[in-house]
Image: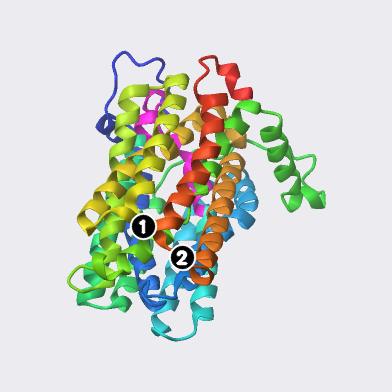
Amino acid sequence: MAGATEPKAKRSLMDALRDNPEWRRLYFARTISLVGNWLNTLAIVHLLGGGEHGTAMALALVFVLKQVPVTFFGPAAGVVADRYQRRRIMLVADLLSAALVLGFLVAEPGGSHVYIYVLTLLQIGVVTFFDPAYRASVPDLVRPDDLISANALSAVTWSITFAVGTALGGVVLYLFGWRVAFALDAATYVVSALLIRGLHAPAPPARDTERSTRLSAVLGIDDMVAGVRYVLHSPPVRSIIVVKFIWGTMGALTLFLTLLGAQPGYRILGSSDMGISFLWFCRAIGTGIGPPIARAFAGGDEHKLRLSVAFGFAVAIVFYGVVPFMPTFWLAGLSVTIAHIGGSMVWVMSTVLLQQRVPTEFRGRTFAAELGLVMLASSASHLVYASLLDRTSLTLTGAIPLAAGVCAVLAGVWIVRVALPKTPMALAA
């Protein structure tokens, strides 16, 4: 990481990409694999019935299985990211993911859901080890004054890959079929692995070797305990971690948009795959707009970053609450786009706050804990609302506002206690 001090002029997103060559290589690797992720998800939705009536729980289960490994394997993944070379972790995760994705090629629409669930669980279990290693590497690969720009650019790119992946996924499924989608996903992992192979990243800090022969040290239990102790004894970090947990209570939005896109009034060219792809595409567009807005407002100022999170919550809650009442797919798509402008502000600015506060030796475990909490909340959200939709008279016009209301209550408490006070000590509340 370059030894820059205080920036003399505000640096752009492209400055961060141009002046940090090692991060640039990692950035392109992640970007390529993300495109494939959305092809993969749409293809799985197709195998499970494409959002037709009565499939809410079947879809919810696969969305949950894409999140549960993060909750259960996340602590171990954080330890691994803080203990071993992060480049190697990401490389192995990419190669194993490519092999597992190819396993979907033997599945059949209408066939056993169990096989799809097991393969999804295994694949995401592997990917779980990639993310803490990736996010913990970023501050070590960019100049200090480029950290917020690197995160904003990553978020914009996530949005672009989400948009490209979902749009491409809808077209690929419509024209070529689901097997081609899975094959393309596997290819993106291979390309990502080739890029990461040439990455020159600093090794984690040297570790205390006195405990290395103890079983608890060998298994990483000591490191997990140390990571938990660090978070529990750092009120500012705790107050930031809870942000994504609150946002996770809206996790069933993926299910809601999938079911909404399959309804007759929202299909495109008579295809539910295209309707789902469109709403996911609109969500992706929103995720690319929010972070640059927040970055322009907040810069690296902690209080303004917290205000950006608060504003993001408000926008997301209001506009997602009205989505099911939109009379056409175009208006529904517009509401989704605006809502996720806010959602992306919540996600990215809370990530920057953590990266600014957490030292590198605890970074992998802290991000793993944060991601585990949000995935736990999102998984519970999926299961609860899928059960309500399948087993009660609740419809999407009731479920989506209900989810927005629950999130509004929790976000309101966080905003009053953490976001509005100007002193950094407010984060200890």
Q: Relative to 343, does residue 121 appear above or below in the rendering?
A: below
Instruction: Tell me if mark 1 has few (under 14), some (14-19) or many (20+) residues whose alpha carbon lies within 10 angstroms of its own.
Output: many
**Between 321 and 350, the one nearer to me in the picture:** 321
Q: Secondary structure at mark 1?
A: helix
Residue interval drawn in magenta: 130-151
- Furthest toward the front, the residue is 393
Residue contact between numbered discs 1 and 2, judged by CB atoms under 8 Å: yes
Pointer 1 residue: 33
Residue at image position (40%, 27%) is 143
How far across and down, in percent of the image, does residue 177 sit? 27, 78
Depth check: give the residue in front, 290 or 35.
290
* Rendering coords of residue 148 (x, y %): 39, 29
The image quadrant where one finds the N terminus is: top left
Q: Which residue is mark 2?
A: 97
Q: How many marks?
A: 2
Q: Main secondary structure of the magenta part?
A: helix
Asked which quadrant contains residue 292, the reply is: top left
Q: Is residue 371 visible?
A: yes
- Amino acid type at mark 2: Ser
Q: Earlier in the sequence, mark 1 or mark 2?
A: 1
Residue 216 on the magenta span: no
Q: Quadrant of the C terminus?
A: top right
Residue 146 highlighted magenta (yes or no)? yes
Q: Answer yes or no: is residue 124 visible.
A: no
**Residue under the point 58% across and 49% down:** 372
The spot of residue 275 in percent (x, y) is 26, 65
